[in-house]
Image (cartoon, coloured by chain):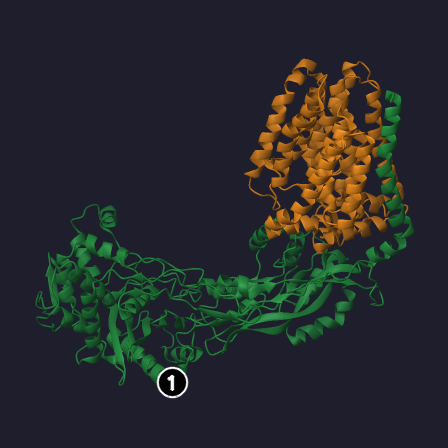
Amino acid sequence: MLILMTIGVIIIYSALTFQIGEERHTSNEYLKQLTWIVISLIFFLIIILIPYPLFDLIIIPAYFVGLAMLLIVLSMPQIKGATRWIMLGPFQLQPAEFAKITTILLLAKALAKPYITDMQILVRLVVIGAPPILLLLLQPDLGSTVIFGAIIFAILAFSDLSDYWLILTISPFIAIATSFYIPAFIVFIILLILVLNRFNLAWITIGFTAVFNIFIFFLMPFIWNGLKEYQQNRILTFLDPTRDPLGSGYQAIQSRIAIGSGLFQGKGFLEGTQKSLNFLPERHTDFVFSVIAEEFGFLGSMILIFIFYFFIYRLIRSLKVISDKEQRLVIMGIITLFASQITINIAINLGIFPTTGLPLPFVSYGGSSLLANTIAVAIIMKYLTEKSFIR
Amino acid sequence: MSNVNRIKLLSAIFIIPFLILTVFLFRFQILEGAKYKRIAEFNFVRVQTIYPIRGEIYDRHFRPIAVNEPATNLYILPARVKDLTEVAAFISQHLPVTQEELREMIHQNRFRAYQELIVYRNLEYAQVVELAEQLERYPSLFFRTENMRHYTRDNHFTGYVGQISRSEYEERQKKRDQERELTRIHQQIGYSINCQIGKTGLEKQYEEYLRGKNGYRMIQVDASGRNIRVFRDDLDLPPINGSDMILTIDLKLQDFIESIFPDKYNGAVLVMDTESGGVLSYVSRPKFDLNIFSRTVGRDYWSDLVSDPSFPLMDRITMATYPPASTFKIVMTAVALDNGLIQPNTRLARCTGSYQYGNRTYRCWNRDGHGSLALSDAIKHSCNVYFFDLSVRVDLQLIDEFMHNNYLLDKTGIDLPTERRGFFPSVDWYVNRLGSSSLITGHKINLAIGQGEVLLTPLQVGTFFNAIANDGRIKKPYLFSRLIGRENDRTIEVNPNKDKILNISSETLKFIQESIYRGVNESGGTGIGARVPGCRVYGKTGTAQNATGPEPHVWFAGYAGWDTPEITVVVLIENYPGTGGSTAAPLAGRIIRYYQDEIRPTNGLALGVDHNE
């Protein structure tokens, strides 16, 4: 984690350094990031040191604080056109980052109850999971919404929910996704019926599920036409960034040029050229990977990807020693959080995933993301400490 | 499934996306790396913004007022600068841009090294030739031919365009980001730091329509200029040029008024189409060279303009307030009649050339005196004594209420970005200033003839007289007639409010109309100079003593018509040796006569149809 943070500061320094003639100008963001690292480490220690019962008590309040922050942020003045930040004097907080963790904690707590029925799991899932997702969609923060979806799916898959309920739950979402393309939807319905049949369910259940999904399919055009034009545009651009060629689509193109031109060895520290293009305004935040890939080449990017995988692998290994169901669900959620953020961010940088605002954990500039991610790691470390197994 | 197996499975699942990313990295950086490296080195793939052509401004008969002309501008690309000192020295040697100015400009944009910056606008041909010879040594500098605004007439209504300021730029940027977040589609309206933007007048008011929308072109060429097509190339967006704008102004009339306005004097002339409120002529003196702002304004010229004691930048029609002088007697008449304080035939103090109140003597403009007059004759002769005596009988509160009830102090709502309010001293204001209300009457006597603290803009006076001509319907004055060109189907509502109505009874209005007609057309009337054979001219003169000089401001405010009133004219000349009757009224008369002989026959359909189409 510390290694990643250090890489982050160096890259932010490089990303915001410009050469004009013989002069070199560096923006001071790297110093701010250093400050945030110190703050994050202090929180890391606090999380580890607070007694476990106390920590357990604050899970529910923390969830509501997270929700409240998401609510407050909607009424906040816009920064860069979006309402994602809460202003706290000189600092800006991005509550979405914290809400992810508080929701994981509460969801795990609620779903880990012994002898829980399938229905109870689903009800609790909706009650806890839906509010933050709705608030995120209102912001709108599609990146975080996608991550949330992945986390909830992972926790669900790891919970005591029966496999067929799992399939029933996610089938409507697949129906919505495939409703844009009729052949895909037909294949999906056939597959759904075949899979459900294997669970030896009553034909009435299978039939009902199929009809329900087909109903959703026919409902989609009506919902679509009910949306305002800008909302439609936003969804279309989300699915196909080249619709906005000069905005996010162009960012993706420039980012790929930067990455590609890094070749095997890279251009060397501070030697990147594409970063100076003002078409990459988020070069020190969401597109920081492209700066790394340009300056340190394939070799450097591979090392970074390896470090990230090793980091994920270590988190997975912690499941070996943790046997508590709730803690396992939390760890699973956090692993998914990191893995999805890392891979989606890099995929955006490579231009193979639609551009949505999403930072690279520990490396991108941004205090909220750094602090939230540090807390997430601290929670897993806390579980391990409880077990007296610090590895 | 055992715990250990589960962990192994999870590790395997999570490695898949990382492997996919590795594959793509390998492809882009190793397999296709050479291609991207080439693109990156020469920066061949870039988006070029195509700026729209700004809409031009024409008068009602399509005579050009503000047009575009090609100009050569010099740009600098900071990222390509090798030696800033050398470049700065080179520029300062050939152009009036100091090294510090250039350094400051580059420093402000130091985190956007690939943003082109404009160094100097509208180079002379000789300068271009001189620079072009040496430009090869400075790869960071280049010329670009772009449109420059040219104004065919110096005037105060079009305003001017100038380079966007940092604060304006940031404000627009913020707005653009907000809209972009809403739609997720790149907004085409964006401004770059080099853009020109409407700074004042109509250029500012209608910036949105005049400006148009940016277009974009993605350029993908290799060193020999061939299209390399790395990425899809159907993303270009053509610019949408700004719409041309037709004004209500009649340039021929405007030119005529400019030509007869006394040289070396300051003032304003406003001519309005009575029925619609459309402005036909908008003259404010002194003038200044509007075209200078399309160039890079020299500091000297700017400071000269700002420090000039005659304030040439000030639009005297909307931004200057004057004591309305005797034109204000109309207000006094209306207040007195509508409150039943006097009747039209009431004779007040006999005019002997002066009026005694307390131990002060107030003079009539006619030292010989007018004798005993009825109200209508007092207006015709503009007898001060009658109105001095009247003012003593009228409560100040009543006049104050009248001013507010008839929107006389409000902004008229003309479609220009800046306009001043009028001022009328209330009772409270006097109490605050003088300490008691006992001294008010003395001031009120002065107010009765439009002197002292009451201040109105020529536009407010014009709008008031226009309303009298319209039997009480207050028309909002406006300059914008319609858009033509690409988006000409769009109608902009300039006059969205329903007409306001003067709070004057119809009998009183009739009486006023009759009196100001007599003032122009009967011998002995002060406005006789404005008389035009074959035309019914109504009007009131005014001569305001003031603190700005020994000579008075002279006024004429009135309207003229044939079957019905057609044009409303306000003339104001600052510090002119003469009176409203001897100078302003004849000037108005010449304007009305010119209108009758030269403008009215050519009007055809142009008049009055602007908004009904």
Q: Secondary structure at mark 1?
A: helix
- Judge by depth and name the residue closer to the eye, B442 or B346: B346
Residue A285 appears in view: no
Name, please, the residue furthest toward the front.
A203
Quadrant of the rendered structure where residue A196 is? top right
Relative image position of residue B417 (x, y in whole percent): 45, 60
Give percent across and percent down for residue B153: 48, 75
Name the residue that disc number 1 marks.
B601
Badge count: 1
Identify the subunit bearing mark 1. B
- Quarter location, residue B155: bottom left
Judged left or right of residue B584, residue B200 is: right
* Relative side of A71 to B407, left or right: right
Specify the quadrant that holds the N terminus of chain B: top right
Give the x, y percent position of residue B495: 40, 63
Q: Residue at x 60, y 22 (%)?
A: A61
In the image, B256 versus B368, the foreground residue is B256
- Give neighbour class at mark 1: few <14, some 14-19, many 20+ (Cα, 10 Å): few
Q: Name the residue: 65% across, 52% down.
A: A233
In the rendered view, tell whether residue B41 sits above or below residue B308.
Answer: above
Type of residue at label 1? Pro
The quadrant of the picture occupied by the C terminus of chain B is bottom left
Can residue B351 be seen here? yes
The picture's colour for chain B is green
Percent from the top left, x then y, of residue B595?
35, 81
User: Chain A appears what colour?
Assistant: orange
